[in-house]
């Protein structure tokens, strides 16, 4: 019996903590193993024919309770792919779905004060965002043992592109390429499945971006007419996120990566290196992007303008 339970535990790790009875059987489990695991609550039924282990998180349980799969932004977030600012649980259901349990799925294990965590993938409380699936996706690989609860990468990314505004859609594609969530060839397939109005986004993809926030700022500045280089090297320090019109460097920070003493010290040193190279440097936080962009944009524009005037003046004097 101990072997049977150990075998089931290992199989549930392979499937990501949630699996259907058919999937477990296809992986070598026997009906007797499954029944024993259920009797000792190693397997917990969360919907007819689908079980969860103790390691299964709330996003998985809520999606299955609803009768669907984790999808769209929620699926991207699990793979550390940029998923914008919408922190609801996104669930995909078949078009013919019935007996939906939205109220139950919205409340499973969550209090009204709960907030999503980037480390345990728990979405915000409340009703999930539903996506309807007309047919079985062609991108489900036979070797994907998470197919019982998670939509495949290309399907999830397409949903995310359609679900967000353009700048966040571009950021998700940038991030998906950078993290290896999809390949370059899959980008071609992605755009064959997107509407004509979004085909123009392809020219704005740049997977060198280190973060979704960086992509958003890059897209906004380029659309405003600035010439923007990404991952610009400055001697003596690490690369800057952006170089604007060849005269101002810009880094987009976050408290998650820039809060310890060593990193803060490095940030000061980095700014000094940029000024030492004759390039004024700016640093902004996500709130400058999403809460006060008009003011942030005005500061960037003025800094760039004055840096250009100083550059032109120096050139004139050197003649």
Image: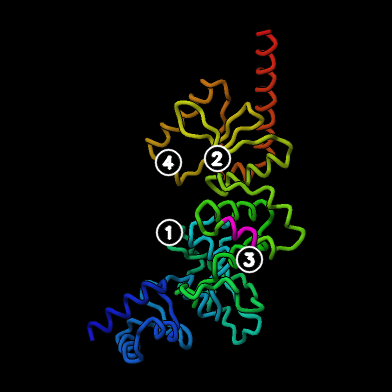
Q: Nearer the viewer, mark 3 or mark 1?
A: 3
| Drawn side of residue 94 relative to residue 121, left or right | right
* Circle nearer the N terminus (4, 1): 1
Residue 66 lies, in percent from the top left, at: 55, 79
Q: Secondary structure at mark 3?
A: helix
Residue 252, label in figure:
2
Reply above or below: 26 against 232.
Answer: below
CA gap, disc 1 and disc 2: 22 Å
List the residue tagged with mark 1.
119
Reply above or below: 220 against 9.
Answer: above
CA gap, disc 4 and disc 1: 18 Å
Residue 191 lies, in percent from the top left, at: 68, 60
Residues packed near mark 4 inside 10 Å, few (<14), some (14 to 19) or many (20 plus): few
Residue occupying the point 66% across, 81% down? 95
Residue occupying the point 31% across, 88% down? 33
* Circle nearer the N terminus (1, 2): 1
Residue 159, label in figure:
3
Residues packed near mark 1 inside 10 Å, few (<14), some (14 to 19) or many (20 plus): few
Residue interval drawn in magenta: 184-189
Location of residue 139 (image quadrant): bottom right
| Drawn side of residue 132 relative to residue 25, left or right | right
């Amino acid at each position: 019996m101990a072997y049977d339970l150990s075998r089931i535990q290992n199989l549930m790790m392979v499937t990501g903590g949630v699996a259907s009875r058919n999937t477990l059987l296809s992986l070598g489990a026997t009906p007797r193993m499954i029944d024993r695991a259920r009797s000792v609550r190693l397997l917990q039924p969360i919907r007819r024919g689908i079980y969860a282990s103790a390691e299964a998180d709330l996003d998985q349980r809520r999606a299955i309770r609803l009768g669907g799969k984790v999808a769209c932004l929620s699926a991207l977030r699990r793979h550390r792919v940029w998923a914008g600012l919408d922190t609801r649980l996104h669930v995909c259901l078949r078009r013919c779905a019935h007996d939906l349990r939205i109220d139950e799925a919205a409340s499973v294990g969550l209090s009204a004060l709960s907030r999503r965590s980037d480390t345990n993938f728990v979405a915000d409380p409340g009703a999930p965002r539903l996506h309807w699936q007309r047919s079985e996706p062609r991108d489900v690989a036979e070797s994907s043992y998470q197919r019982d609860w998670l939509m495949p990468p290309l399907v999830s990314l397409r949903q995310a592109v359609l679900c967000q505004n353009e700048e966040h859609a571009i950021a998700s594609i940038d991030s998906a390429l950078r993290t290896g969530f999809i390949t370059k060839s899959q980008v071609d397939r992605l755009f064959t499945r997107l509407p004509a109005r979004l085909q123009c986004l392809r020219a704005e993809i740049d997977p060198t971006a280190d973060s979704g926030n960086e992509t958003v700022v890059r897209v906004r500045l380029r659309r405003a007419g600035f010439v923007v280089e990404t991952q610009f090297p400055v001697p003596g320090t690490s690369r800057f996120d952006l170089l604007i019109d060849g005269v101002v460097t810009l880094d987009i920070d976050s408290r998650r990566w820039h809060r310890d003493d060593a990193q803060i010290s490095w940030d000061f040193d980095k700014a000094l290196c940029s000024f030492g190279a004759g390039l004024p440097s700016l640093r902004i936080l996500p709130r400058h992007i999403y809460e006060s962009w008009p003011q942030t944009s005005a500061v960037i524009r003025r800094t760039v303008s004055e840096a250009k005037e100083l550059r032109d003046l120096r050139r004139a004097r050197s003649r």
